[in-house]
Image (cartoon, helix red, strand yellow):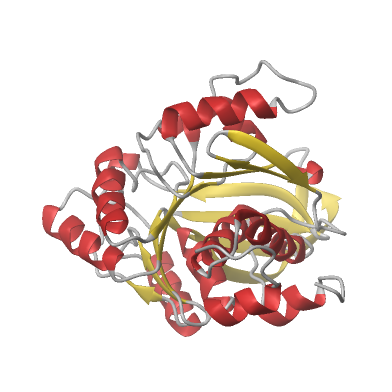
Amino acid sequence: MASPSLAANVILERIRSLKVLVIGDVMLDHTIWGDAVRISPEAPVPVVEVERDTWSAGGAANVALNATTLGASATVVGRIGRDEAGRRLRRLLSDAGVRLFPLPAGDGPTIQKTRVMVRRQQLCRLDREADPTAYSLSEDDAIDALARAAADHDAIVFSDYAKGFLTSPLLARISAAARDADRIVALDPKPRRDLDFRDFDLLTPNRKEALEMAGMAGEYRGAFPAEEVCRALWKRHRTRNLVVTLGEDGMLLSRRGRPGHTIPTAAREVFDVSGAGDTVIGSLTLALAAGADLASAAHFANAAAGVVVAKVGTATVTPEELLASLPPTT
């Protein structure tokens, strides 16, 4: 039973007893930090003098990392290759206390995004990945084991980065097991995958994704058409709670196809939005599983995202950082 106006400190305390299962496209985020003070004599491009390299968990792995940082127990499910990137990602997750669900490694390389940062600005991004068929999960035994695991967790988060791990049959099988056990089921979608799903507890598209899912891509350049989008997504997917992230315009909340109010963004400074969606879906799902109503959960997630986007690179938020970002009366 959801509690109205649940305070952030109460939500955080309850999160400590929760277990979340994150399923989706896991990846390794690699950042090259440096400076560029001259143009190459070989081509009209900057020469970057590399100062250091950093690595962090990305995609579904970052959702799980965010959940663990907030105090929950997290298990992540996704394809990790047998390469150096995969070994590095496994170490990062293990060191952070995130459990890895045992799966066959798959045929493709570990998905890796490399961002080149010059003076805290992203110069370019390099992606390493294979065809989506290399990452899909088709082993019946693994899917059955995953369905059993879903029933043993308080919440299940599907994190779709359109890399191929999530399929409509997989969503149907796991979500059915979760619903039978009365668990929270959430999805951070990528519309170009056109996955078939219904009756989830939470959906968190951004503005562009929501318009595309509603069949309105390219039609709106002005104010966000909240009523039309909420009605269309409810008709197609029957998701009980919809939260559309609108960037600087905040978050639109909707229950059962009826648009509610929009809460303003909590971000005071925005250095990097990389991974902010991971923070939103993770913190929102945990807050709902902790008993918060949608408004309280959204304010909680909004505060968490506000902390993360003020950091450079894929990042997480601690309970202390989250509480410090809130007004004294919250």
Residue sticking out furthest to the top: 219
Q: Is residue 240 above or below residue 149?
A: above
Image side of residue 189 versus residue 269, left or right = left
Question: Which quadrant holds residue 148?
Answer: bottom left
Q: Where is residue 307 drawn, in percent x and y?
A: 75, 66
Question: Does the image show residue 171?
Answer: yes
* Image quadrant containing the C terminus: bottom right
Residue at screen point 62% across, 71% down? 54
Residue 168 sits in quarter: top left
Q: Is residue 42 above or below residue 274?
A: above
Q: Nearer the viewer, residue 169 or 38?
A: 169
| Residue at 23 percent of width and 48 percent of height | 173
Q: Is residue 246 visible?
A: no
What is the quadrant of residue 215 in the picture?
Answer: top right
Q: Residue furthest left?
A: 141
Where's residue 324, x and y in %?
81, 77
Where residue 147 appears, as percent x and y from the top left, is 23, 59
Residue 101: where, in percent of width, then height? 30, 70
In terms of depth relative to the viewer, which is nearer, 280 or 299? 299
Q: Is residue 21 left or right of residue 272?
A: left
